[in-house]
Amino acid sequence: MNQFEFEGLGTTFVILVDEDSNLTSTKEKIISYARNYENRFSRFIDESEVGKINLAGGGTYTISNELA
């Protein structure tokens, strides 16, 4: 069992990986997914989907399927 930690989305992730063969690849994929999610949906990042909606101040918006 392998463990790694990283910071994201305002929390500390502790990930346990039960397989040794592709640990580096698995770790990179998990961190990349979390960073991508944060960059797309964080209310604290003005360029994210949520950030743009918050800054617009009202109206009708087209949003991604993931945000819907």
Image (tube, helix red, strand yellow):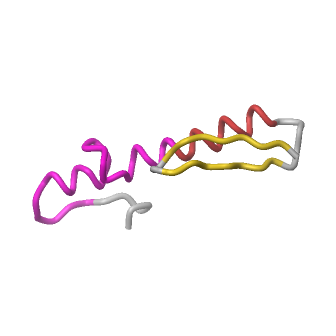
Q: Which quadrant would residue 21 be assigned to in this image?
A: top right
Residue 65: give x, y in percent of width and height. Answer: 41, 62
Horizontal side of residue 16 vs 40, given as left or right: right
Q: Which quadrant would residue 63 be assigned to in this image?
A: bottom left
Q: Is residue 51 magenta?
A: yes
Residue 9 or 59: which is nearer the viewer?
9
Residue 5: give x, y in percent of width and height. Answer: 66, 42
Residue 61 or 19: which is nearer the viewer?
19
Residue 7: give x, y in percent of width and height. Answer: 54, 42
Residue 13 or 33: which is nearer the viewer?
13
* Circle count: 0
Residue range highlighted in magenta: 35-62
Q: Is residue 18 above or below residue 68?
A: above
Residue 44: give x, y in percent of width and height. Answer: 30, 48
Q: Is residue 37 magenta?
A: yes
Residue ID at (80%, 36%):
23
Residue ID at (39%, 62%):
67
Q: Which quadrant would residue 60 be assigned to in this image?
A: bottom left
Horizontal side of residue 68 vs 62, given as left or right: right
Residue ID at (45%, 50%):
10
Quadrant where the C terminus is found in the figure: bottom left
Horizontal side of residue 66 vs 16, given as left or right: left
Hey, which residue is sitting farthest front in the picture? Answer: 12
Residue ID at (39%, 48%):
40
Q: Is residue 35 above or below residue 66?
A: above
Q: Is residue 4 above or below residue 54?
A: above
